[in-house]
Amino acid sequence: MKRIYINVFLVKLLCVFMVGCQSTIHSTRINDNKPLQAGQGVVALELVNNTDRLASLHKNWDEVIVIRIDNEEERKQAAIQKAKEKAKKNGKKFDPEKVDWEHDYYSLRANSKGTVDSQVFVGAMPEGEYIISLLYSFYSDGNMSSWINMPVFQSAGVFQVKNAQLTNLGTLVFQPLLDTKKASFWSNKTEQRAYVTRLEESTALAPFVNHHYQNLYNSLDLSQVNSWKEDPFSKLRNQLGALSRANAYGDEAISVRGSDYNVLAARFGKLHLIDSAGNVETQSLPTASQLTASGQINDTLLIGSERGVLFSQSQDGSWLQHQPISATEAFVWLGSDDRFGYALTSSEKQHSLYRFVELDKGWQKIGSFKKKDGHNWLVQNGGLFVFFDDAGELKVINDNKLLTYNEASGQWKSAKYESFKKFSQLKTGELVALEVSQWDGIGDQVVSVDYGKSWHTIDRSLSFFGDHKTDASLPALISGNRIVSVGRVKENKKKGKKKLRVISASLNKQGKKFNWQSHGEVKSNCTTLLPELTQGEVLFFLCEQGQVVKTDDFGESWESVVVIDIALMQQQYDAFLDARKAELALTDQKETSTQ
């Protein structure tokens, strides 16, 4: 690829998005009520951020900005001709080397229907060759604004758009190599802070396009689906993508009722199964998307994912794929009673609750619940959660309402209830939750051992600043009706700095202070307790970059169970950068020798 793409236009685009220079960016938005314009094709790509969030104010990317590169000479000559005519008219000297000109820029915007942590971008663009210039995210709350971007260029490669055809770019990966939470990450211009690459396996995005843009889909010629063009860097990109997939970020901890296993679900279809002894088995499901839910139904382990995809484990251990619902919905919870399986899904503006007997047919929607924003400028709202009571009856908490389904009438009965930011039902039936606070959204940890009839408030000590991850995590329960959490405790009672330690206590009457017993110090940067994974007295903690550690002696010793090898990814990316520089040098040498 010519040096101009990765130097001159990188500077220009950074100017456009960071300083506010004026530039025309064409929208690729699709109106499904209108036919595709003549000469246009459709582009679809999935983007996975292999981290919990981009930055403190940015969860995901808003736009993927692409540049058309096959018409650059045409646009350059048109700009020169226009400048020449203007100079002649005004009687001024004309230098074609000083004429400014622009590429065609196009913006793909994320379609959030049917996704949770992955993103899908779909848009229509004129026939031609393109390269992704950068990923872009903007935040504003009326009081402040923030924007971040990540250059891409040769890291992804060149793709082609053809008239009335689909270009499926599969899955792109944003892989941080440094800590994205630090402001220096986004002001650091080194290429080694992160990389963007693509997975070798092609993610099938045609069903997503079909479910969202049916009229458009029916007008496409699908006899040929376009993708990336091969180049000297394809093999290195695939190796980078495989490394990211092997080091998938996962924080979706699920306690699976009726199963010997608990589950930690991750990006790129990565699944960690934790058995009754606390041992971890890792499997890769046939998807590049985030795994989002798990349930044991009729002795079959089910795993829910994004875009309406459901997986069931067969007797030989292999995974079968099902599409029982629309790709506009994502699974967020799975459960079962003696008669039915149940599934909670999330779409753009609502949650839907289904029940079913068979995986591939007969799904009945028994409830639709409007989504509430986590907060507005006046009120912090609670989330929507599902659990079973002591009689095995299905309950739904929707912000400050408790909903019970009436089988005879098919209606939901509503009663006032507590609001929670986080909520989980353990496989033994107990409920652990995080209350809503109108101050900053995050309230006290609470636990219920009577299926939500009463709640115990967990009283613990934390730093007012700096303990956000710990403050926002749930408590765990172990045998003997003991609660386990994380709190700040002095090394000795009279002096010493308070340190984050594993703490435990027997449950007592609500409103009474706990008689905490202090244990080992929490491992540095691994302060998020994952109570859903607790097996016996084996506790699991999530670390900052996705590593998971466990302890069977309350923090006196630690063992790594999910390793994220940042050093190996950095090493492989350095090899990619070296190969790119060598290719550019060779190109320059060839161009010089022909002049």
Image (spheres, helix red, strand yellow):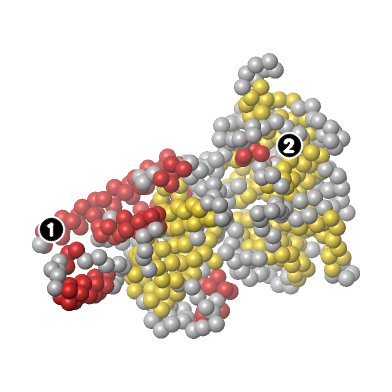
Which residue is more in the foreground, 398 or 286?
398
Residue depicted at 19% across the width and 63% down the height: 98
Q: Where residue 263 sits in the image (x, y, percent)? A: 65, 48
Q: Is residue 234 left or right of residue 445?
A: left
Q: Where residue 436 sits in the image (x, y, percent)? A: 73, 47
Which residue is more in the foreground, 579 or 404?
404
Q: Which residue is mark 2?
A: 536
Report crowding for label 1: few under 14, some 14 to 19, many 20 or more residues within 10 A (C-alpha): few
Q: Is residue 458 left or right of residue 569?
A: right
Report crowding for label 2: few under 14, some 14 to 19, many 20 or more residues within 10 A (C-alpha): few
Count of numbered circles on the image? 2
In the picture, the quarter occupied by the N terminus is bottom left
Query: In the rendering, which numbered label is found on residue 189?
Result: none
Q: Which residue is mark 1?
A: 592
**Residues at circles 1 and 2 in contact by the CB criterion of under 8 Å:** no
| The furthest residue to the front | 90
In front: label 1 or label 2:
1
For marks 1 and 2, the one nearer the N-term is: 2
Residue depicted at 57% across the width and 64% down the height: 112
Give, as a three-letter code, the residue at label 2.
Gly
Q: Where residue 590 sits in the image (x, y, percent)? A: 15, 59
With respect to residue 37, does 241 lie above or below? above
Give, as a three-letter code, the residue at label 1.
Thr
**Residue 16: which quarter of the image?**
bottom left
